[in-house]
Every structure is written in C-alpha cells, then in structure tokens.
Amino acid sequence: TYASSVTVGNKDNVLISGIETSSEGYLVSAEADTGEKIWSTDAPEKVDNPRFNSHTIDSNGNIVAVGERYYSNTEYGFVLAKYTDQGNEIWNITRNKSTRFLSVATDNKNNIIVNGNIQNSTKDFVVRKYSSDGKEMWSTYYDSGGQDTAGSVKTNKNGDIFVSSRIDYQDTI
C-alpha cells in the first residue's frame, strides 16, 4: 500500500488514501488508533499507476478523494470520488482529459474544490469547483507560459478558496 494522504476522521479513526499495490487500484481505508483496519475499499482499474493523491472529509463525514490514472506514458486523466464514512462509494467521476487532481477541499456548503494540473502546450494549474453531488460548477486555470504546478487547496469558514502552486514564469527579452 502506498499512502499519499492521511487525516483523522470524525470518529477519531485514521483515514488513508493512495494506491493498493496488490490490486493496482485506488485505496481509501480507515484504521482505529490501535492500527486495526476498520474498513478498506479499492476500485481496481486496468491502467498504469492509478492513485488517489489527496482526500478530505466534508461536514457530513463523507470522504472526498482525488487522484489520477495513467493510460500510457503521455495519456492520463483524473478521478474524483465520494465515499460514506463507512467506505461505501456514493459516486465517482473519471475523465481522460490530460488533467490530474492533486489536492481537494470542501467549503461551508460541502461543495468540492480541487486543484491540479492540465496539460496543454505547457503544463498549467487548474482549480475546479463541484457541487456536493459531483456536478461541475466552474473551472479556471492559470498559464504562465511555462511549466506550472498545482500545490494545495483550502477553504475557510466563509467559503473563500485559497490555492498554492509553483509558477514557472518565462520572462523573455
């Protein structure tokens, strides 16, 4: 198991997301503070290097996880999935749009905000907002002309969105 994100859940259990290497699928699991596994779920995919990169917990205790899935050396897409606090999948979205999601947060209305990268002629970072039931509300991206990399996304109690990224500014003379 490769863990890429860890949080403490509403029931003081430890939530882990990443990749389950034995099945080559996405993984979300919960463990007690003693280390005993409470539940685990994975969704095997017939693609290379599938993984959840990050997850968060909404105000209802549901787990929202984001990641990426590779189809070849040059083709990849994103995955966005929502689970109950018992690990049952509520819904998932996968796309083959040369987009990978790296970070996720929820706002004060349980809307989902993701930060990631989109590959155009250069690599740009994208911020996208989904409703709590997985409908895309809006999307924006930043292109410095160089290779920009997404960082993390957070929200505050007012629903304001904060993102971090690395901008590869190309100054030409």
Image (cartoon, grey):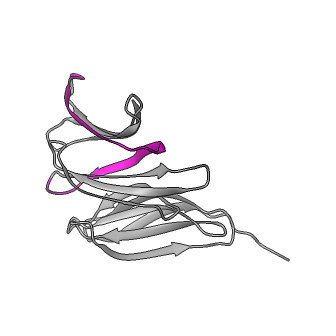
Q: Which residues are magenta?
A: 34-60
**Residue 163 occupies quadrant:** bottom left
124 part of magenta stretch = no
Q: Main secondary structure of the magenta part?
A: strand
Using the image, determine if residue 162 lies above or below residue 12.
below
> Is residue 18 in sight in this rendering?
no
Q: Is residue 119 left or right of residue 90?
A: right
Residue at figure coordinates x 29%, y 54% from the top left: 81
**Residue 37 occupies quadrant:** top left
Q: Name the one closer to the observer, 27 or 157.
A: 27
Residue at figure coordinates x 21%, y 56% from the top left: 58
49 part of magenta stretch = yes
Using the image, determine if residue 94 lies above or below residue 53.
below
The location of residue 28, given as percent across then percent down, is 29, 40
Q: Name the one closer to the observer, 97 or 40.
A: 97
Q: Name the one closer to the observer, 53 or 33.
A: 53
Residue at figure coordinates x 39%, y 29% from the top left: 1
Q: Is residue 115 left or right of residue 143?
A: left
Q: Is residue 42 left or right of residue 102?
A: left
Residue at figure coordinates x 46%, y 61% from the top left: 96
The location of residue 168, given as percent across then percent down, is 67, 63
Question: Image quadrant for the C terminus?
Answer: bottom right
